[in-house]
Amino acid sequence: TGNYPRVELQGVAEVRNGTVLNQPYGQGRFEIHYKEPVLDVPSLEVQIGTGRIVGSASVDLAGETVRSRIEGTTIPLDQIQWLRSGNNSISGSIRRLNLIAEGPYRRPALDGQIDVADLAVAGEKVGDFQTKVKTENEILRFQASSLTPDVDLNAAGTVDLNENLDSIAQLTFRNFVLTPYVKKLLPVAPEKLSSRAEGQLVLSGPLRHPEKLVISGRLQSLQVDFREASLRAEKPFDIEVRDERVNIKKAVFTGKGTVLTLDGLVDMSAQKR
């Protein structure tokens, strides 16, 4: 309605196989109300796999700002495009998502919480986690903790909302799964293998380029279980991962009739050397 060029639009858009911010979705329904210069979406509903996201948004096209609130449930992690780019398969679901976005629509400030259920990496169960996020001056701050009683993990850090998503985070953990990385350290990895570790690590680098991340710290303990045997670290040891290479410093593992000493670089890239 209205007189050109000042018109007012109102209606409903239903979309199949759409994409938002490089994230594909199966179906979407958007109520739309446009009156220059504001585009209101009073109601939106998007399906990602078996998951569902609902919410609302308002975009000021003249001021280039956005206000949005979304809630999500049971969103499969293996359907999230950004997580599918890694070398290790990730499964589980976002059990609950609450997020408020406000500010410049290219990089709005975020405030919310994400609960992840049944997280598994490379087929091995890791547990349930809760992460709280908040941004200020284009810096995202987060705190994550385990909701699984037998896995004690806490992480806190920042992500610079630039092109590379430069990040730094500190992690402390107990009974945490490191099996996907242990397998890469072995010349031939057995089918039946699990691991548990305790330690402190610092992660830094660009999240958009995982191969460039640097991880350093100390493992207080590490146990690796095979089908009929196990190895346990005799003492704490330092570790650093850089350029897809692991630098292990004077680690000694013992098992039944076995003593294994590791000290030096191991290449974890596809072109192992």
Image (tube, rainbow, N blue to C red):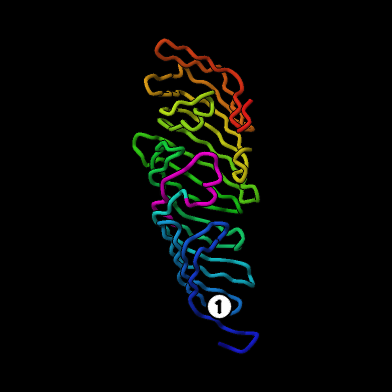
- The residue range painted magenta reads 79-98
Q: Nearer the viewer, residue 216 or 267?
A: 267
Above/below status of 157 relative to 31:
above
Q: Please state, as top left, top right, bottom left or bottom right, where the N terminus lies in the image.
A: bottom right
- Residue beneath the point at 52% across and 58% down: 24
How far from the left and from the top, in percent, is residue 44? 46, 68
Quick one: which residue is furthest to the bottom in this view? 3
Above/below status of 18 relative to 128:
below
Q: Is residue 156 visible?
A: yes
Above/below status of 28 relative to 207:
below
Q: Nearer the viewer, residue 245 or 101?
A: 245
Residue 78 in the magenta stretch? The answer is no
How far from the left and from the top, in percent, is residue 144? 46, 43
Q: Quadrant of residue 234?
A: top left
Callout 1: few (<14), some (14-19), or many (20+) C-alpha neighbours within 10 Å?
Answer: some
Q: Nearer the viewer, residue 152 or 188?
A: 188
Secondary structure under tag 1 reads: strand
Above/below status of 172 relative to 89:
above
Total numbered labels placed on residues in the image: 1
Amino acid residing under circle 1: Tyr
How far from the left and from the top, in percent, is residue 165? 61, 47
Q: Is residue 196 visible?
A: no
Query: In the figure, is residue 2 to the left or right of 192?
Result: right
- Residue beneath the point at 39% across and 51% down: 95
How far from the left and from the top, in percent, is residue 39? 56, 74
- Residue beneath the point at 58% across and 17% down: 263
Q: Quadrant of residue 123?
A: top left
Q: Nearer the viewer, residue 53 or 39?
A: 53
Q: Which residue is mark 1?
A: 34
Q: Please state, as top left, top right, bottom left or bottom right, where the C terminus lies in the image.
A: top right
